[in-house]
Amino acid sequence: MPGPRLLRGSANETLAAELVEEFNTASDTEAAVRLVLHRAVMETRSDRGVISWIEGSEMVVAGCFDPVGELVPVGSRWPLAGEQVSAVALAEGRPEAGSYSSLGVDVPDPALRDMHSRLTHLLVVPVAVAGEDVAILCVSRRRAEEFTAEDGEVLDLIASAGANALRSAHLSDLLGAALLEVAAGRADAASVERIKTDILRLASHELRTPLTVLNGYLSLLRAGFFGSLSESIDRVMQILERRTAEMNALVNDMLVAARVEDPQAPTEAETLDLRILVRDAADSVAARASDRHILRVELPGEVVPARVDADRILLALRNILDNAVKYSPGGGEVVCSVDAADGWARVRVADHGLGIAPDDREKLFTRFGRVLTSANSHIPGIGLGLYFSREAARRCGGDVALVDGEEDGGSTFELSLPLAH
Ligand code: ADP
């Protein structure tokens, strides 16, 4: 029997690309699991393959592929700690081989015990996306031939290539179930928040890859790599570029919001003059504003020192300024002023736009909290900007609040930060 494919250099990349393409054709979880298992068993010359989701301290079987033997039932649960090889693979983040004779698994079901007894060797690899373990991929043999390091490499490659397809299929299953719960009115506040987190993670990560491809091709087309563009194609290109830019901004918002609520994401604090950030944010928003808008920036003469995560606060300022322009569809003046007093720096952004009804104010700073009225329903957004801005300010010891917002009378938002000494 031939050995596993030698995976070195470009051959490795070619197989990886082939696998990613193959796995991404899966339309649902069952298909994704089947495709990955089939490849895993074939490429490592195994007799059986099992994928299990990791749920806390348990593994839940997602699928089993075994052309001749009995299948491990989908949905059956196994304690992670009780199964040495998987536990080691997870802890080390790499393939781990072992033999069934030395496996410390307590198999209560006699049929399963019998099935296990006919297996000899196993090879396990964690399936991880962005450092998060999602599942375990395990292949087993019935013959007395141990798995080699090369088998481990192949399985690792298959797990990496299938990780995204598996994770997104699984997440959409979980989301589907959770949304049904919401629809049935059984979800509590905590599970609604969890659903929002899942949607954020799913949407931001899964949309980023196709968007990168789209952006790449648009730039190549614009640079003339595929020949010069006729006038009519150029018009279509402009629409595509504008729409893609909107999508980039939305996905970016989701990514930032997903990151801001990640407790492990580091906060980069540095002391700087807040006036520079405000000027930066105002310049980038002014460049995109229509000529019906006037953006006036009022800065104090002295330095306004604050200890902040510059990237996050810059994004927060841009969001607030962007909103001031966006929610003033009739145009008008937007004033952004900065002052420093009593240990606090305050950036106020006042517009003469649509305003916000008092009853709607609670909702503004929540995730996906859009306040839709007949006057603003045509304005694009997903309700993450203010949530992210407040979280970013709070991480730096400050806050964002609506300080004045009459319906039809415009709004004033304030971002406050402690002054640095
Ligand atoms: P998005 O703009 O993507 O909807 P945000 O979180 O930035 O998300 O804003 C949440 C909601 O707050 C918006 O949908 C809008 O209804 C309201 N809003 C925010 N800023 C303003 C503003 N300057 N004037 C009027 N309404 C605003």
Image: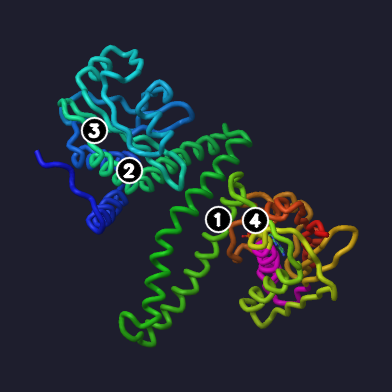
**Element at label 2:** helix
Q: Earlier in the sequence, mark 2 or mark 1?
A: 2
Point out the stretch of residues depicted in magenta: 314-335
Q: Residues within 10 Å of mark 3 (few under 14, many from 20)?
A: many
Residue 254: which disc? 1
Say whether marks 2 and 3 touch (CB < 8 Å): no
What's the amino acid at mark 3? Answer: Phe
Q: CA distance from mark 4 to mark 3?
A: 47 Å
Q: CA distance from mark 2 to mark 3?
A: 15 Å
Residue 407 % position (x, y): 78, 62
Q: Which residue is mark 2?
A: 159
Say which residue appears at 89% left-offset and 62% top-offset: 341
**Element at label 4:** loop
What's the amino acid at mark 2? Answer: Ala
Quick one: 14 or 258, which is closer to the camera?
14
Say whether marks 1 and 4 touch (CB < 8 Å): no
